[in-house]
Amino acid sequence: MQIISALKDIPGASPSGGNRLVALQPHRHMVQEHVSDTPDFGAAHPKIEVTGLSVYYGKTQAIKDVSVTIPEKRVTAVIGPSGCGKSTFLRTLNRMNDLVPGVKVEGSVLLDGMDIYSPHVDVVELRKKVGMVFQRPNPFPKSIWENVAYGPKCQGITNRATLEQIVERSLREAALWDEVKDRLYSSALELSGGQQQRLCIARALAVEPSVLLMDEPAASLDPISTTRIEDLISQLRNNYTVVIVTHNMQQAARVSDYTAFFLMGRLVEFDATEKIFTRPSRKETEDYITGRFG
Ligand code: ADP
């Protein structure tokens, strides 16, 4: 088995400790009934519990009966060949698929134990809790400051000092503050692509989400900007649950604690990243990570 060399740098990927199930006990019934191969999450609590998820675009079934539990304050990578359903899966976690005409979602997605597909859920509130960053940075054509303050302003925050604190905190958390603090009122479009992507992350963080979904966040960036985004993701795990779709396996190995491997709409294997890339349980996973297909 070829071992991806970048794996030696995985932060926090190696599980340790024996009695880790203790922290999972309130949710054990879910895990035992629906997910036979949930890995040991150590001290992390389950954040998102997906059960029997199927997603259809008209007659095309993009996600097939997926059950998986995503741990809190860890980075979970979603990998798999193009078209296997990675983005669709990610978008079900904050109901972005609702915007696609003809989409049908079956199964359940619990966030902190609450069903996000319940008719009582306010989708705008949900998307504040579960923020999203896309492949191409998409800042508003406004100043850096306005980009970050936009969400809090929509939430009704008008006090200037409060907004300034939020802008600074968010830009610091997105590792952008030092680069932009002297030009907060310049257009966001003057920033480099990598800076724009970190600005989009700051914009997502400004409304205090607990989950950050990232769909190929470094795919359009140069290698140095990519490294900065990867370093940032490693930092974010201290405060946020991160789910990242990436077609770049080395990136998954570098940034994530857990990895879910999808193939043709199914979840083939979900485990600690270190295990997926060195000792996968399934032949399909091994074939994929060793480059035999995909
Ligand atoms: P990935 O992110 O792994 O490349 P996607 O989730 O984008 O995969 O796509 C999974 C399947 O769903 C593919 O067959 C794709 O063609 C289909 N699909 C994705 N988005 C749509 C859409 N908006 N309408 C119809 N089919 C879609």
Image (cartoon, helix red, strand yellow):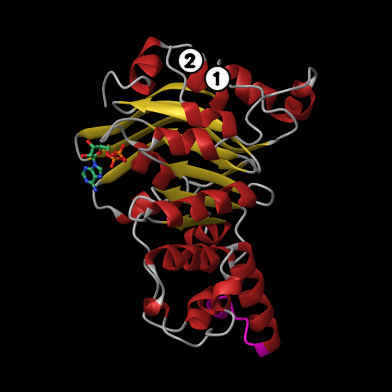
Please name whichever residue, 203 or 25, is drawn nearer the observer in this view of the structure: 203
- Horizontal side of 70 relative to 261 (left or right) equals right
Cα separation between marks 1 and 2: 6 Å
- Give the residue at x 54% y 66%: 202
Kind of residue at disc 1? Lys
First to last magenta residue range: 153-160
Q: Is residue 116 above or below residue 44?
A: below
- Horizontal side of 226 relative to 170 (left or right) equals left
Q: Find disc 1 in the rendering and name its residue.
A: 275
- Horizontal side of 133 relative to 171 (left or right) equals left
Q: Position of residue 40 (x, y in %)?
A: 66, 22
Are the residues flagged by discs 1 and 2 in contact, CB closer than 8 Å?
Answer: yes
Q: Secondary structure at mark 1?
A: helix
Please name whichever residue, 252 or 148, is drawn nearer the observer in this view of the structure: 252
Q: Is residue 80 above or below residue 148?
A: above
- Give the residue at x 32% y 35%: 85
Q: Position of residue 282 (x, y in %)?
A: 43, 12
Q: Find disc 2 in the rendering and name its residue.
A: 280
Callout 2 crowding tier (Cα within 10 Å): few <14, some 14–19, many ≥20: many
Q: Tell me the quarter of the image containing the N terminus.
A: top left
Q: Which mark is residue 169?
A: none
Q: Report whether residue 3 is seen.
A: yes
Residue 55 picture quarter: top left
Q: Report whether residue 259 is seen.
A: no
- Give the residue at x 59% y 80%: 181
Q: Tell me the quarter of the image containing the C terminus.
A: top left
Tell me which image quadrant ligand 1 sits in. Answer: top left
Q: Secondary structure at mark 2?
A: loop
Please name whichever residue, 49 or 118, is drawn nearer the observer in this view of the structure: 49
Kind of residue at disc 2? Pro
